[in-house]
Amino acid sequence: MAPYHTLTLERDTLKVKWAINDCCFHIAHNSKAVPLEKIQDVQLSEDCCLTMFSLKQVNVETAAGAGREVEAAFCAEPEKVRDAIQLAARLHKAAMSAPGAVAGMTRAGGLGGAAGPGGGGTIAARVAAMEGLVRRGALSPDEVARIRVPVLAAEADPLPRLVDAANAMDQAIITPNEFAQIKTKIIAQIQD
């Protein structure tokens, strides 16, 4: 039996779809939606079979139940999956506790930057967005060090365009080369 998992981060939920091939040429499709506010912990685990292939399983625990609410194995980059889920849950909880104070999630599921009338976002949201871009590999720590103060001091948040470009690259809408060119231009604009 081999399970296949699809994890999708949406505005306020983590959606999981999986299919299990029962070896009799029958595939059972299942799905589950977990509200981000209920996510308590995201851990990586590995058993002997996963360890043989240098794989890890992502486990999501919620406040609702004892044990794991979601288990997904065979993720290409489990550390990035874990970090993205943790960041989304943390930002969602912050937005729920102080509506309008923290930039939330955009419809595409990436980090947003518009919060409040000026669309400027908070310093905490901008720092979280930069950390998320570093975890995704879209920005290097050196690039963040160069743009950190200008981003935090800017009246309008310049990060949503960069996040949008990173999302487009992840979805193969633009090539990595195009993303690199866009990133270079955005960083130059931020530093001016």
Image (cartoon, grey):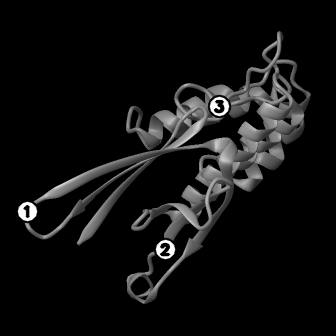
Q: Between marks 2 and 3, how big is the CA–CA gap?
A: 27 Å
Q: Is residue 167 left or right of residue 30?
A: right
- Crowd tier of the residue under label 3, counting other residues whose Cα lies within 10 Å: few below 14, some 14–19, many 20 or above: many
Image quarter of residue 146 = top right
Q: Which residue is mark 1?
A: 25
Quadrant in which the C terminus is drawn: top right
- Crowd tier of the residue under label 2, counting other residues whose Cα lies within 10 Å: few below 14, some 14–19, many 20 or above: many
Residue at disc 3, secondary structure: loop
Q: Which residue is mark 2?
A: 56
Whichever of labels 1 and 2 marks the residue nearer the N terminus, that label is: 1
What type is the residue that disc 2 sits on? Lys
Report x, y in % for residue 85. 61, 51
Residue 186 numbered tag: none
Q: Please give the name of the residue rendered at 81% of the width and 38% of the height, measured from the top-left corner.
A: 94
For the residue pair 117 and 148, the one nearer the viewer reads as 117
Q: Which residue is mark 3?
A: 105
Report x, y in % for residue 127. 82, 42
Q: Please give the name of the residue rendered at 69% of the width and 43% of the height, measured from the top-left corner.
A: 37
